[in-house]
Image (cartoon, coloured by chain):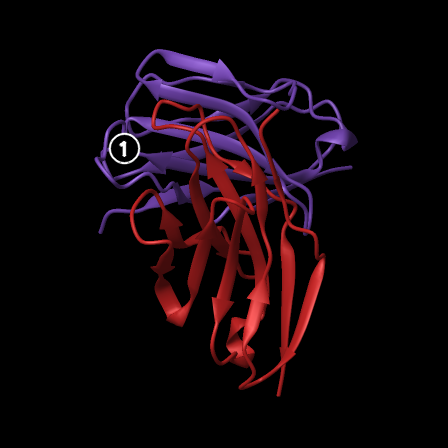
Chain colours: A purple, B red
Amino acid sequence: EADIYQTPRYLVIGTGKKITLECSQTMGHDKMYWYQQDPGMELHLIHYSYGVNSTEKGDLSSESTVSRIRTEHFPLTLESARPSHTSQYLCASSPLWTGHSYEQYFGPGTRLTVT
Amino acid sequence: AQSVAQPEDQVNVAEGNPLTVKCTYSVSGNPYLFWYVQYPNRGLQFLLKYITGDNLVKGSYGFEAEFNKSQTSFHLKKPSALVSDSALYFCAVRVNQAGTALIFGKGTTLSVSS
């Protein structure tokens, strides 16, 4: 079944640790996105990609980095986690060209807590 | 600057009553408008979209939304609310197909009481 997956769903980690949040989609979408969302708040775009080897920063400044080596995989990495990184991270994807269909498909999210 | 506003942090309705969740936008160019719903500890689920054509669009779970260009609004509606509709609702806009991503409103919590 075509879907978008995020792991882990929940992560509690200490300050200074390096972490990678995984996002994979089996829908064959070219575009992928990372959003940051504080509980019950709006989403802010932090990274996006139009395809393999394409990555761009979003509207919200972030200390994280991303890579896009394979179409289906778009991991997000924090080299040194800090309490200010505590948030929910949502991954999404969409086709590059879809005619009249422009919606994005979201993964379940990773809730990160940095202690 | 492009923006989306959801003026109500919370909307409370009784089950069976009609509901409206408000959204206004500010963009240059033709807007592509979306509504998403988020249940606790879940990702966002697509509800409906307006791209072009009929101003009244129908979506999932009995929801519909009305695009009003003169008022720059895209309010979400449902004729008869269910308790299971209680969730966080986001309005979003994208200016054109080549745009980077969606711009989201702050979200409105819908609470439906039995």
Under mark 1, the amino acid is Pro
Residue B29 point in image, percent of width and height = 44, 27
Residue B55 at what x, y percent from top left? 37, 54
Please say whether residue A36 is visible from this viewpoint: yes
- In the rendered image, the quadrant that contains the N terminus of chain B is top right
In this orientation, does residue B40 appear?
A: no
The quarter of the picture where residue B113 lies is: bottom right
Residue A14 on image: x %, y %: 73, 32
Protein chain holding label 1: A
**Image quadrant of residue B60?**
bottom left
In this view, B15 is above or below A89: below
Query: Residue at label 1?
Result: A95
Q: Is residue A59 left or right of A101 when viewed as pictured? A: right
Does dot 1 land on a helix, a strand or a loop?
loop
What crowding class fits label 1: few (fewer than 14 Cα within 10 Å), some (14-19), or many (20 or more)? some
Instruction: Pick whichever, A96 or B17, lies toward us.
Output: B17
- Residue pictured at 64% horizontal, 57% vertical: B108
Q: Looking at the image, which is closer to me, A77 or B99? A: B99
**Residue occupying the point 47% across, 14% down:** A56
Quadrant of image for the C terminus of chain B: bottom right
Judge left or right: residue A40 versus residue A96.
right
Q: Is residue B30 above or below residue B62?
A: above
